[in-house]
Image (cartoon, rainbow, N blue to C red):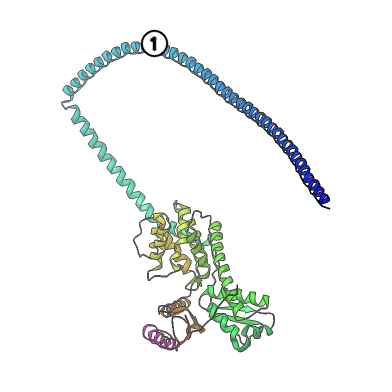
């Protein structure tokens, strides 16, 4: 048993030793195989790098040779051009030498001829002096005295002839001036035949059926109140079949209200939020239309180079009236009258037409300072770089400034012709609109007032204030103060109701 264990131990020890030796041998073989593979791969990489380096070297060599060849070609071309310039310079130098010789020959020849001419001139002067001395001896007066007598005689004859011609011309001009002026004015008026349309302060909005009236009024009148507050137009819904009356002195407000109503009725959605959205959209459309009207007017009249702001003011004339006469139509008429008269009188027709169109732009500025419209229009024209003669014609057409050009009286006359036609203007409408505008401006001067609207032919003034600036108690006081100021400073028929509107809106956004 003991020998068996010893034999097993020896066998196990021998197996371990043999296994270790075999494992060492296999490991050594594998290591040698890995080393050989690495050496082989390194050799391949080395050869690839050598090939890449050779390729790079050849590429750089080729590029350098190409650059060298290009520089060499440029040098050759430069040398050729230099040789050509040297050749041309040599030819020019030879030509210069040849020309110089010819000029020297001509100069020597001219010198001789000049000497001969000078000698002959001296001889002629000597003979002339001898003749003058003989004449003075024979006549008994000197040459200067003879010249003075001749000049005095000619002056007297010229004055007599000139005075006679001037008297005849003045007599003829006096006889024909009035006749010619009447002919020009009558012919100009006949050539400019425009319609005279009197604007009023109401617009009729037609609807398909009376059912729409109830939708426009809304529950407890909320829709119609929202529309009136947003546009400043009084909306009259009465028994008139299929019609709603829009009343306001400002044509722009009436047009905004009309277009907004049209969109609301067409769309069918009528509620306060939608009304405010549509009115804001229509106001933007009106601004765009104003610019388009101004551009179309200048194109129709053939007037170019106006400042964009002046073009916008011309477009605003469509929605303004002067004593009931449409301001844009009046300005176009004055422009055509000025152009025709300027052509008849031999003046610049284009400048006259430009001055005629712009003569009333002082009536339509965004802010209306306390200045006569002619002075304000002149300042606007100067601000937007119009010519001095046009600025003077605008400022002097009501004699606020002195006339310095011929265009000024022409514009004044044409403005009077356009406004003096029967039915062209109406004083009552102008004074009515001016009174309502003054009423709105008076209320707008108070702090916290956002918008003011005169409605019901001036019998009611609605004042919209900011809720964050004016409290309920202050709104009551504001209404009283405005009423007292209107009563003290303005003249008006009947009574005026002042309504101060204050509302609180809570607005938030879900994002």
Q: Position of residue 395 (x, y in %)?
A: 38, 62
Counting every numbered tag in the picture gives 1
Which residue is at a point 42% across and 80% down the rendered structure image? 443
Near-viewer residue (466 or 63): 63
Near-viewer residue (394 or 163): 394
Q: Quadrant of residue 102?
A: top left
Q: Main secondary structure of the magenta part?
A: helix
Vertically, is 316 above or below 447? above
Vertically, is 26 above or below 83? below
Near-viewer residue (503 or 46): 46
Q: Position of residue 491 (x, y in %)?
A: 40, 84
Position of 48 compared to 503: left or right?
A: right
Q: Is residue 184 magenta?
A: no
Near-viewer residue (370 or 346): 370
State which quarter of the image contains the C terminus. Answer: bottom right
Residue stretch rendered in magenta on the structure: 474-493
Position of 104 compared to 235: left or right?
A: left
Q: Position of residue 71 (x, y in %)?
A: 55, 23
User: Within 10 Å of the Cα at label 1, are there few (<14), some (14-19), or many (20+) other Cα atoms?
Assistant: few
Label 1 sits on residue? 101
Is disc 1 placed on a helix, strand or loop?
Answer: helix
The reply to whether residue 236 is visible in this rendering is no
Q: Position of residue 345 (x, y in %)?
A: 44, 53
Q: Is residue 485 magenta?
A: yes
The reply to whether residue 27 is visible in this rendering is yes
């Amino acid at each position: 048993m003991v020998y068996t264990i010893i034999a097993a131990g020896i066998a196990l020890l021998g197996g371990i030793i043999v296994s270790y030796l075999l494992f060492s041998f296999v490991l050594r073989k594998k290591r040698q195989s890995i080393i050989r593979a690495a050496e082989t791969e390194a050799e391949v990489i080395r050869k690839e790098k050598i090939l890449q380096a050779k390729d790079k070297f050849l590429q750089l060599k080729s590029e350098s040779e190409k650059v060298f060849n290009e520089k060499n070609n440029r040098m050759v071309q430069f040398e050729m051009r230099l040789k050509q310039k040297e050749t041309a310079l040599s030819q020019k130098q030879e030509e210069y030498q040849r020309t110089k010789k010819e000029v020297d020959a001509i100069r020597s020849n001219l010198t001789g001829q000049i000497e001969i001419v000078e000698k002959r001139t001296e001889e002629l002067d000597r003979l002339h002096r001898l003749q003058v001395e003989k004449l003075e001896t024979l006549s008994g007066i000197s040459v200067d005295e003879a010249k003075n007598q001749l000049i005095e005689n000619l002056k007297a004859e010229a004055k007599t002839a000139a005075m006679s011609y001037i008297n005849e011309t003045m007599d003829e001009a006096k006889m024909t001036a009035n006749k010619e002026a009447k002919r020009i004015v009558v012919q100009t008026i006949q050539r400019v035949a425009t319609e005279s349309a009197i604007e009023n302060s109401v617009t009729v909005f037609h609807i398909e059926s009376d059912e729409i009236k109830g939708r426009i009024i809304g529950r407890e009148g909320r829709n119609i109140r929202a529309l009136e507050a947003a546009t400043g137009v009084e909306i009259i819904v009465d028994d008139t079949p299929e019609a709603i009356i829009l009343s306001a002195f400002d044509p722009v407000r009436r047009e905004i209200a009309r277009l907004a109503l049209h969109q609301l009725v067409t769309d069918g959605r009528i509620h306060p939020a939608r009304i405010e959205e549509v009115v804001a959209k229509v106001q933007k459309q009106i601004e765009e239309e104003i610019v388009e009207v101004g551009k179309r007017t200048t194109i129709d009249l053939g007037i170019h180079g106006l400042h964009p702001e002046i073009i916008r003011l011309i477009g605003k004339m469509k929605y303004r009236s002067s004593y009931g006469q449409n301001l844009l139509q009046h300005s176009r008429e004055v422009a055509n009258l000025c152009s025709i008269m300027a052509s008849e009188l031999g003046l610049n027709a284009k400048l006259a037409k430009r001055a005629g169109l712009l003569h009333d732009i002082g009536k339509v500025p965004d802010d209306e300072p306390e200045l006569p419209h002619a002075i304000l229009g002149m300042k606007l024209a100067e601000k937007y770089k119009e010519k001095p003669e046009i600025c003077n014609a605008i400022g002097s057409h009501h004699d606020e400034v002195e006339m310095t050009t011929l265009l000024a009286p022409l514009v004044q006359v044409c403005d009077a012709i356009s406004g003096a036609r029967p039915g062209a203007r109406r004083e009552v409408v102008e004074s009515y609109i001016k009174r309502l505008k003054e009423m709105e401006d008076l209320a707008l001067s108070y702090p916290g007032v956002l918008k003011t609207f005169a409605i019901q032919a001036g019998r009611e003034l609605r004042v919209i204030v900011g809720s964050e600036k004016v409290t309920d108690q202050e709104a009551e006081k504001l209404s009283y103060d405005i009423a007292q100021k209107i009563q003290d400073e303005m003249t008006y028929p009947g009574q005026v109701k002042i309504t101060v509107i204050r509302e609180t809106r809570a607005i938030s956004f879900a994002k």
